[in-house]
Amino acid sequence: MRIKDVHEAKIGVIGGGSWGTALANLLGTKGYPVDFWVFESEVKDAIIRERENTLFLPGIPLSENLFPSNDLSAVASDKDLILIVVPSHVMREVSLKIADIVSEKSVVVSASKGIENLTHLTMSGILRETLNRIPESHLAALSGPSFAREVAMGLPTVVTVAAKDKAVAAFVQQVFATPVFRVYTNEDLIGVELGGSVKNVIAIAAGILDGLELGLNTRAALITRGLTEMRRLGVKMGANPRTFTGTAGIGDLVLTCTGDLSRNHTVGKKIGQGMKLTEILAEMRMVAEGVKTAKSVYNLSRKLGVEMPICHEIYHILYENVPPKEALHRLMTRDLRDELDES
Ligand SMILES: NC(=O)C1=CN([C@@H]2O[C@H](COP(=O)(O)OP(=O)(O)OC[C@H]3O[C@@H](n4cnc5c(N)ncnc54)[C@H](O)[C@@H]3O)[C@@H](O)[C@H]2O)C=CC1
Ligand SMILES: O=C(CO)COP(=O)(O)O
């Protein structure tokens, strides 16, 4: 592909939640004019009037270079780079709406994390199906340990951009990188996306442990064995095992298993404290991707014959009302085995 000069790139951002807003603002602050699609008219109005996303990222002043709009077609048309950051369960619906509008020259980057329930596709898999006018080599994923609020505050952050085409990954890297936002590239698209998706399920588990006040040994064990499960699934699906020791694997897993800013961790903590999932979700406007991803991972791993006992117990807790302590007891009393046995 012929990559346009990075500095002249025309950019559209689709998704005005906390992460879409933080990334759009990063690009706007860097000097790019950013056409910015937001779902709610109230978010558009707040950004125009107050230069603030009062709903999803309150307290962060936003760049004058952000041009918010509720017109999806206008934001998606004639762009060199389109960043999609909508919750994973609406990725198909939203991307289908732009399928006939996206220019075939566009590079499309997903910063969303999840696995679709019905198809078990990652976000780039959905985009490959819906945006069939653009070549698969133009698809990329941005992932890694990155709480939106910290990025928006300019705190140093390191992420990875994955694309099968090295030149595409390098282009996206150049567009996003700043002195406080360091971007690595990786050709392992599926590995990077699986890391960002499975960590959300393990983050719910970490929250549950915190809600039950089970201490730090348990959390360290969870992160370690959670990483093993993530890698097993990844390797079965063709990922490079080394990806899981990178920012989009262990990096994001550690962040969300230890950080109070994680919505997935928060959901888990409330479950550990005895709240029902339906009550927790009813009071949340933001998305906790791990809830839906737990179902995809459960079904996908069973289909592929990949052993993922922690993820399976999280599924049982979320969808079959298994008490967390019973699930934990089952995990702790599984057959004893060799740590390096990957079978
Ligand atoms: N917030 C964060 O720190 C990070 C989030 N992500 C990922 O980014 C993705 C988006 O999450 P956030 O920006 O955090 O969202 P959010 O949880 O802050 O807000 C929810 C978003 O969903 C949108 N929405 C709700 N219904 C919709 C519909 N029918 N069609 C289109 N949009 C709709 C809302 O407008 C809002 O933008 C998720 O996959 C998340 O895992 C990834 C890294 C960091
Ligand atoms: O993915 C994230 C940070 O990298 C955000 O995690 P939560 O969705 O759990 O808040």
Image (cartoon, rainbow, N blue to C red):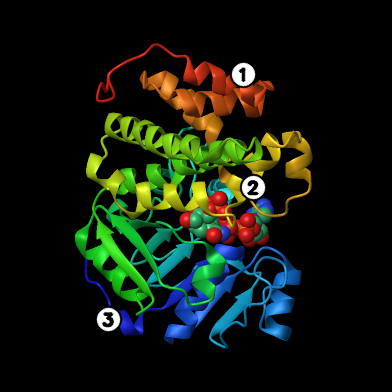
Please name the amino acid that badge 1 sits on.
Glu
Classed neighbour count for the residue bearing mark 1: other residues with Cα under 10 Å, few (<14), some (14–19), many (≥20): few
Q: For ligand 2, tell me if the residue under mark 2 lies within 8 Å.
A: yes
Does any portion of residue 86 appear in the rendered image?
Answer: no
Q: Residue at x 33, y 43 (%)?
A: 190
Please name the amino acid that badge 3 sits on.
Asp
Classed neighbour count for the residue bearing mark 3: other residues with Cα under 10 Å, few (<14), some (14–19), many (≥20): few
Q: Ligand 1: which quarter?
A: bottom right
Would you name the residue on which mark 2 appears?
266
Q: Earlier in the sequence, mark 1 or mark 3?
A: 3
Q: Quadrant of residue 45?
A: bottom right
Q: Quadrant of residue 289?
A: top right
Would you name the residue on which mark 3 appears?
5
Q: Secondary structure at mark 2?
A: helix
Measured as percent of width and height from the top left, residue 52 is found at 67, 79
Q: Is residue 341 left or right of residue 267?
A: left
Q: Is residue 156 left or right of residue 343?
A: right
Classed neighbour count for the residue bearing mark 2: other residues with Cα under 10 Å, few (<14), some (14–19), many (≥20): many
Measured as percent of width and height from the top left, residue 229 is found at 38, 31
Measured as percent of width and height from the top left, residue 119 is found at 48, 32
Would you name the residue on which mark 1 appears?
326
Please name the amino acid that badge 2 sits on.
Thr
Above or below residue 299? Residue 95 is: below
